[in-house]
Amino acid sequence: MASAAMDASGPGAQSASDAPKSNFVLKHTLVGHTRSVSATKFANNGLFIASVSADKSLRIWNAETGGLERVIEGHSMGISDVAWSTDSKYLVTASDDRTLRLWEASSGELLKTFAGHRDRVMACEFNAASSLIASGSFDESVQLWDVRTGRSMAALPAHSDPVVSVSFSRDGTLLLSGSFDGLCRIWDVASGQCVKTLMHDDNPSVGHARFSPNGKYVLAYYLDQHVGLWDYKKSRELKSYSAAGPSAPKTPARYCCPATFTLAAPPKVVGTTETGAIIVWDLNSRLVSQRIDAAHAGPIVGLGAHPSKSVIVTGSIEPEPCVRVWAEPTSTAV
């Protein structure tokens, strides 16, 4: 991400008239899942989209045409999360059947099954070298897995409530976990030690958390419907983006809606809501640059950003379990 994307200046760095406007429009609706879509992710090469669902399937879509490339099945229960390897050749899925599975994207072949969690696995991610996989579970633990051997390298008693989000720093030395206990914890991958704990003053549950692309900040989406941008080294929330509106009460949400960064300039934060809306904020001014109401008929719990273009992909739960691709007109990705 460009340095401007991570400007740490305080609130009010831009006026409302200066804040750039966004113009995401619907490009594709991808239909095929028969139950709630739980995660949607662009491949790191930008060519493909992965979506997973409570229908136990992983689907791979062509990002340009919206065509279905492959359906992969094998889990015995619904799938909660999916992640691509850095080279876009492999995917890992996290399931309610308490396992993670490693797949070859081109063939759909199952390569490994990672077993060890004692409850539903909610989150997964590769490190930058694609040599490790991190997972978070309802059993309140975080596990680190060796991709080559399939063995658990560490089982961290990370939280006092379910772990719903994991994210590696860009250099792979740190791991972020987010939990319903209201904590974001940062772990040293080599030692397995917790090196930082981030907690908001009101201690709302964390629904989603991730490192910024440059590894210097943490973006956390809380169930009180606000998104916080943290300077984790200083344990300070620099900016807050309200999904419920600046004057609306922070009513606790029922679903873990995600937030992410768009990597194309100008820098933006994108979040979704359980009312089916997509909200785009100017990162630095915190002003809403676009709101798409009724983007889906129900809660949007899947969100991914294209690695270089202003394109996002969303996925929603029943009664409309579909995947949608949104792009700004200047983008040629879809």
Image (tube, rainbow, N blue to C red):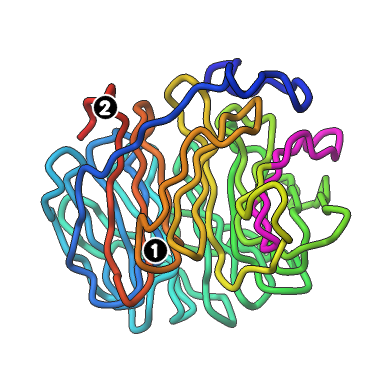
Can residue 233 be found in the magenta stretch? yes
Q: In this view, does 137 lie above or below 189?
A: below
| Viewer-nearest residue: 231 or 19 | 19
Q: How far apart are marks 2 and 1 (CA)?
A: 32 Å
Q: Mark 2 points at which residue?
A: 329
Residue located at (50% from left, 22% from top): 20
Q: Name the residue under label 1.
A: 93
Residue 102 position in % (x across, y down): 35, 60
Q: In this view, does 210 lie above or below 328?
A: below
Residue 60 position in % (x across, y down): 22, 55
Q: In this view, does 79 lie above or below 323?
A: below
Say whether residue 5 is left or right of residue 224: left
Residue located at (53% from left, 78% from top): 120
Res 24 quadrant in image:
top left
What segment is highlighted magenta in the picture?
A: 221-240
| Viewer-nearest residue: 98 or 29 | 29
